[in-house]
Amino acid sequence: MAREHFSSACPEPSALTGPVRTCVGCRTRAAKSELLRVTVGSDASGHAAVVPDPQGTASGRGAHLHPTTECYELAVRRRAFARALRYTGSGAGLTSTPLGEYLTSSAP
Ligand SMILES: [Zn+2]
């Protein structure tokens, strides 16, 4: 008698918790709902910048980050935003100041 083994106890984590994304700061996988989506936008002076996308509705390539200053600083140190967002512009590059301000102002 053949028995089916594939349906035994080994559920995909994503089947239980929904979509999972990797934080670009600490590189830990977490539920998408726990992470803040960020995209490439522009800052107040029109420079390319990493901007928060709390609703997750902005078009274009996004990256995901725990909404904490710790993960933000890790990502900045690693230049993870430009890599994750496939930003290829030159010059001053991608500033992440708008996101930093967003995280600082929304922190308790
Ligand atoms: Zn993180």
Image (spheres, rainbow, N blue to C red):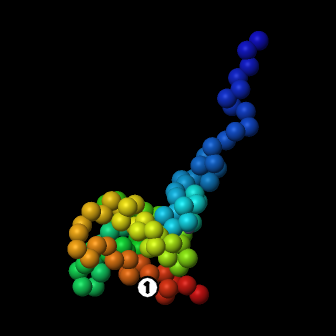
Residue 66 position in % (x across, y down): 54, 69
In depth, the one of 71 and 63 nearer the eye is 71
Q: Residue at x 74, y 19 (%)?
A: 3
Q: Secondary structure at mark 1?
A: helix
- Ligand 1, image quadrant it occupies: bottom right
Q: Amino acid at mark 1?
A: Glu
Q: Residue at x 43, y 85 (%)?
A: 101
Give the image quarter of residue 11.
Answer: top right
Task: Report whether 34 appears left or right of 51.
Answer: right
Residue 73 position in % (x across, y down): 49, 76
In depth, the one of 102 and 48 nearer the eye is 48
In this view, 21 is above or below 55: above
Q: Residue at x 33, y 59 (%)?
A: 86
Q: Which residue is mark 1?
A: 101
Whether residue 55 is visible here, answered yes or no, is: no
Give the image quarter of residue 93.
Answer: bottom left
Classify mark 1 as within 8 Å of ligand 1 or not, answering yes or no.
Answer: no
Whether residue 7 is visible here, answered yes or no, is: yes
Q: Residues within 10 Å of mark 1 (few under 14, many from 20)?
A: some
Placement of the C terminus among the 4 image quadrants: bottom right
In depth, the one of 96 and 61 nearer the eye is 96
Placement of the N terminus among the 4 image quadrants: top right
Task: Report whether 103 appears left or right of 47.
Answer: right
